[in-house]
Amino acid sequence: MKGGHCVRWFVTRTDPVCIVNSSSPLQRLPTNGSDSISSTLLQRVRAKRPEAWERLVDLYGKSVYRWCRRAGLGPSDSADVVQEVFAAVARCVADFRRDRASNHPTGSFTAWLATIARNKIRDHYRRQKDRPRAAGGTAAQQQFLEVPNPEAANPEESDPIDRSELEQTDRLLSRRGLQLVRAEFENRTWEAFWRTTVDAHTPTDVADELGMSVAAVYKAKSRVLRRLRQELDGLTGL
């Protein structure tokens, strides 16, 4: 891949593991108020920051792989197409505009990425179609010849990356985003957020449990949610 961002996919059974610039571990975002915190992930990716690219692939890699598998590709072919998708993202991300993204009412990055994935999956099937077929080809080979039809009367009936799949991807993205920003907060701040937002405990109960004021619990919850929205701004349609 151009720009020094090497994406390597290893598939064990059906689970891919994505390694981006594997010689260096995923860096934690600084918490000192630098522009890495104030800017969104998408802005940092456009600025070609290695840590941002690593995080983007961490967030979306398995979803893109799942899309390929849903489209009927095998594990190895799916891994290859995933690489092609992220290579295209690296080349074109500067051109992404939320208001122009297709197939999603909010014009999210997820929808834009799905369009790239659809195109790369179709390219894969077309390459398969152009290859000479052995005599007595198998049913699997015949399946490879069936290119998904973007002109279908009801695209959602034949689209492996339909709206429900995009919505599921966005939900998974939010959960993974929480895991990635976790390291930026002290334990008590995170516990206050988690117990009120995820466990649905009342702020009063959480304040008693953690030895905080109710106002501090609300502030902790707000800080984490604000950070998550900031990091994922423009990515999801949620």
Image (cartoon, grey):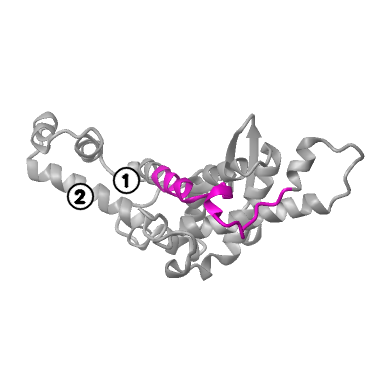
Task: Please give the range of residues in magenta.
Answer: 146-172
**Percent x, y of residue 104:** 44, 59
Q: Which mark is residue 184?
A: 1
Res 5 quadrant in image: bottom right
On the picture, is 149 further left or further right than 167? right
16 above or below 226? above
Q: Is residue 166 magenta?
A: yes
**Percent x, y of residue 112:** 51, 60
On the picture, is 62 further left or further right than 221? right
On the picture, is 226 further left or further right than 176? left
Q: Which residue lies at the image location 13% right of the left edge and 33% below the top edge?
A: 206
Q: Which residue lies at the image location 78% right of the left edge and 36% below the top edge?
A: 139
Label located before the other in sequence (1 or 2):
1
Can residue 86 be seen in the rendering of this structure?
Answer: no
**Label 1–label 2 contact, CB within 8 A:** no
Res 142 quadrant in image: top right
Q: Residue furthest right?
A: 135
- SS under mark 1: helix
Q: Amino acid at mark 2?
A: Ser
Front position in the image: 103 or 22: 103
Q: Is residue 210 magenta?
A: no
Quarter the N terminus occupies = bottom right
Q: Residues within 10 Å of mark 2 (few under 14, many from 20)?
A: few
Q: Which one is in front in this view, the residue at disc 1 or the one at disc 2?
A: 2
Q: Which mark is residue 222?
A: 2
**Percent x, y of residue 32:** 30, 55
